[in-house]
Image (cartoon, helix red, strand yellow):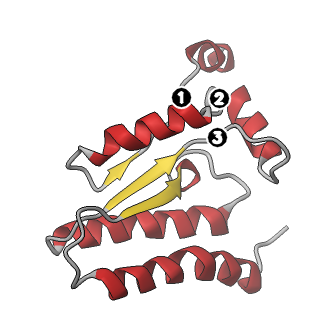
Amino acid sequence: DALTQKQLETVLTAKAESAWQLHELTRDLDLTAFVLLSSSAGITYGMGQANFAAANSYLDALAAHRREQGLPGLSLAYGPWEADGEPGEVYRERMGRIGMPALTVAEGLALFDEALGGRDALLVPFLLDQGALRSRAD
């Protein structure tokens, strides 16, 4: 099925416009961090999720834009997280099959803490299952 304009706008409004408003409202403040939680879907395997991938890529670009202006900016393009009953369960299962298993909450938070000390505008914290990757190559 083709992506509709409404589907694209719904996701972009929720993520991109909200992030831009936060940028506008905080750019003159003396922030120590400006962290955007993105998704690896914008970088890796976002098949069937073009609107979601586009919105997350926007967040990644906004973090880079802020860094270019001398402002704090970090986008964490996380891979899938473990969580019961969320709509993303099918996505997490598919990602696990292709070698990107879900992060536990503890793993995701540890990667968040580690990322705060870095100098990059974009980091992609996710797990790789080398066995699953090798089996797909066969």
Kindly identify which numbered label has been placed on residue 101: 2
Q: Position of residue 19 (x, y in %)?
A: 46, 76
- How packed mark 1 is, by other alpha carbons closer than 10 Å (few <14, some 14-19, many 20 or more), is some
Q: CA distance from mark 1 to mark 2?
A: 6 Å
- Residue lying at the far left in this picture: please name it: 70
Q: Quadrant of the N terminus?
A: bottom right
Kindly identify which numbered label has been placed on residue 81: 3
Which amino acid does the dot numbered 1 rest on? Leu
Instruction: Using the image, determine if residue 98 lies above or below residue 74.
Output: above
Q: Secondary structure at mark 3?
A: loop
Which amino acid does the dot numbered 2 rest on? Pro
Q: Secondary structure at mark 2?
A: loop
Kindly identify which numbered label has been placed on residue 12: none
Is 75 positioned to the left or the right of 64 in the image?
Answer: right
Which amino acid does the dot numbered 3 rest on? Trp
Figure quadrant of residue 11: bottom right
The numbered mark, 3 or 2, whose residue comes first in the sequence reads 3
Instruction: Using the image, determine if residue 27 lies above or below residue 43.
Output: below
Tell me, yes or no, whether the two marked residues, 1 and 2, touch with CB atoms within 8 Å.
yes
Residue under numbered circle 1: 127
